[in-house]
Amino acid sequence: MSTRIRVLDDADLPAARELASADPVTNVFLLSRMTEGGLDRSRLGCPVHGAWRDGELLAMLHVGANLVPCGDPEAVAQLAGHVGPWRRSSSIMGCSDLVMALHAELSRRWGHPWAHTREIRAHQPLMAIDGQPAIACDPRVRRIDESDFDSYFRAAVAMYTEEVGVSPLDPGGSYSRHMRALVARGQCFGIVDDGRVRWKSDIGVAWRDVCQIQGVWLDPVLRGHGTSASAMAGVVSLCLRRHSTVSLYVNDFNTRALRMYRQVGFRPVGEMATVLY
């Protein structure tokens, strides 16, 4: 029977959650987005395309600022034909095999808008920890509150610019609003020294018992002194008060960070990829 492609809506939420929750650590972004905004296009802010066969949802593709695939690789490739040549996404991210195959298919079908990239990070180890850290926690790590926001935001901008290669600042102030929302939800952690944030990280997305740490940054003047491992251990300990699994993913070329995460107790559980435009 042929595969049928259509935009998903809230009536499809049970099938979409079932598909993504087969691997909640890999798909926590999609699960978090669906929990917050459902699948209604106007409420979510972007469409999610689904591929169906015999009444079963085989794959889906979140088509927003982040293009995020999930499900059967063959069906994901078919979804590429419904994205079109007018690229609005600034990245493709998710399971490495799906991301790289999707990028290849988009490039084949639509050419330059998708083929021309700023950077491809094809191998990003996905790591997780589901117990207390293997090393002592830095007692200075705490949740960030509104009084810390200005310094925390400066650190977040520095982290993003260093990691992604472009500034997140925009005329509409969307990045500032995003970070304020994370702080308000108690999802930001840091070491604050005399009013200045020296270490930061955030729960970028979460779904039920799984959270994903993003935005890890240490003040350059403190790097190389062993601060990161104990600070990350402190973050893990705080996250485990709300979630049973703490995850993150890291560039494979960042060998120092990989060693640090292993020292804390993170173990590899998969591989992600990011295509940046």
Image: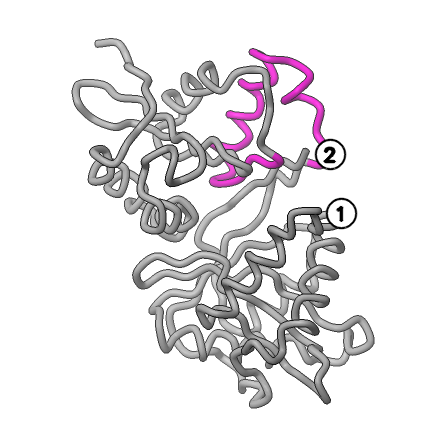
Residue 113 position by quadrant: top right
In this rendering, would 70 be left or right of 88?
Answer: left
Residue assigned mark 1: 165
Q: Are marks 2 and 1 in contact (CB under 8 Å)?
A: yes
Q: Position of residue 242 (x, y in %)?
A: 35, 73
The type of colouring in the image is one colour
Write down the region rendered in magenta.
90-119
Indicate whether 154 appears above or below 199.
above
Dot 2 amino acid type: Arg
Residue 257 position by quadrant: bottom right
> Tag count in the figure?
2
Q: Specify the farthest residue to the left.
A: 55
Indicate whether 256 appears above or below 19.
below
Residue assigned mark 2: 118
Q: Residue at x 28, y 14 (%)?
A: 3
Q: Quadrant of the N terminus?
A: top left
Dot 1 amino acid type: Gly
